[in-house]
Image: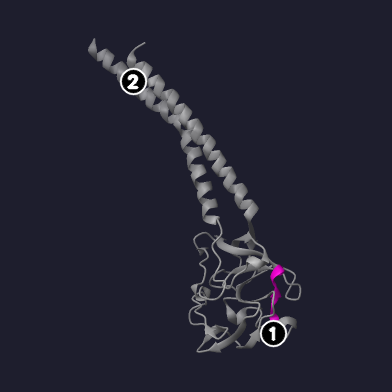
Amino acid sequence: MSRTRRTDEGRVRLGSVLSGVAVALGCVLFLGGFAWGAVLYQPYTVPTGSMTPTIGSGDRVLAQRIDGDAVRRGDVVVFEQSSWGDLPMVKRVVGIGGDKIACCENGRLTVNGKEVAEPYLPKGQGASATGIPTTTVPKGRLFLLGDERSGSLDSSVHLGDGDHGSVPRDAVKARVDAVAWPMGESGMLERPEGFAEMPGGISEPGPLRLVVTAIAVGMVLILGGAAYGPVARLLGRGRGRSRTGEAVGAR
C-alpha cells in the first residue's frame, strides 16, 4: 500500500469522524433550540389592526411567557380581560400602578407629568384620538393603549369602567418579542426608549435571537456534515481518475 493511499484513507476516516460530530452537534442545537423556544415562547395571531404599524391585522407574533410582575412600561403584551372581550388581546403598556396618565398636551402622552416620545405611532397620527383626562392607575394594574389610537378598544375607551380602564397584572400571559409572519415585515420589536428613564426602566429583550441562532447553526452543521460523504466520494473518484491517467501516461 503506497504512502499516498494510506494518507488518503486517513483523511477520509478523519473527515467521517468530524462529519459525524458536526451532525450530532447540529442535532443538539437544532432540536434543543426548538425545544427551548417552545418552552419560552407561544405564537399568537393578532386579529385586529389596533397595533398598526408595529403589528398588523393577521400578523403572527412570538410572545415570551412571562409573569405579570415582569411587565414594564412600553412592553407589548398579550392579555385576557373578560370585560374587554373573550379573546386574547395585544396592546402596549403605557402606565403601571401609581402612574398618572394624561393626553394630550403638545400632542403627546404624559406619564407622571413627563411627555413620552412614541415613535411607534402611525406617521401623522397624534398620541390620542379622543384625549385622556388625568387618570391614576391603581396599584397592581396596567394602563394599555393600541399604537393605532384612532381605532383601538383600549384603556382610553374603558375609562368609565371600574379601575379607570386598567387591567390587573395577572391578566398578562406573554410579552411580544417579534413578528414571525409575514417574514420581513417587522421582525424583532424595539423597546421604546421614551420610557427608559422612568422608575423601573424598560424590559430587556427575551432570548429569541439566541433561540433562532441555535436553530440556524444546527441546521448548517447538519447539512454540512451530511454533505461530507457524497462530496468526499465525488472528490475521491476525481483523484482516482487523475492518478490512473498519470500512471497510463508514464508507461
Residue density around tag 1, few if under 14, some if 14–19, many if 20 or more, within 10 Å? some
Q: Secondary structure at mark 2?
A: helix
Residue 159 bears which disc, if any?
A: 1
**What residue span does the magenta drawing correspond to?**
165-171
Q: Is residue 103 left or right of residue 15?
A: right
Instruction: Give whichever of 100, 184 is nearer the camera.
Output: 100
Q: Quadrant of the C terminus?
A: top left
Q: Is residue 163 left or right of residue 210?
A: right
Q: Secondary structure at mark 1?
A: loop
Q: Residue under circle 2? A: 241
Q: Which badge, 1 or 2, is on the more N-terminal residue?
A: 1
The image shows residue 119 at horizontal and vertical percentages of 49, 76
| Disc 1/disc 2 C-alpha distance (Å) | 82 Å
Which residue: 36% across, 16% down? 5
Where residue 238 sits, quadrant-wise, is top left
Q: Amino acid at mark 2?
A: Arg
Q: Is residue 32 magenta-colored?
A: no
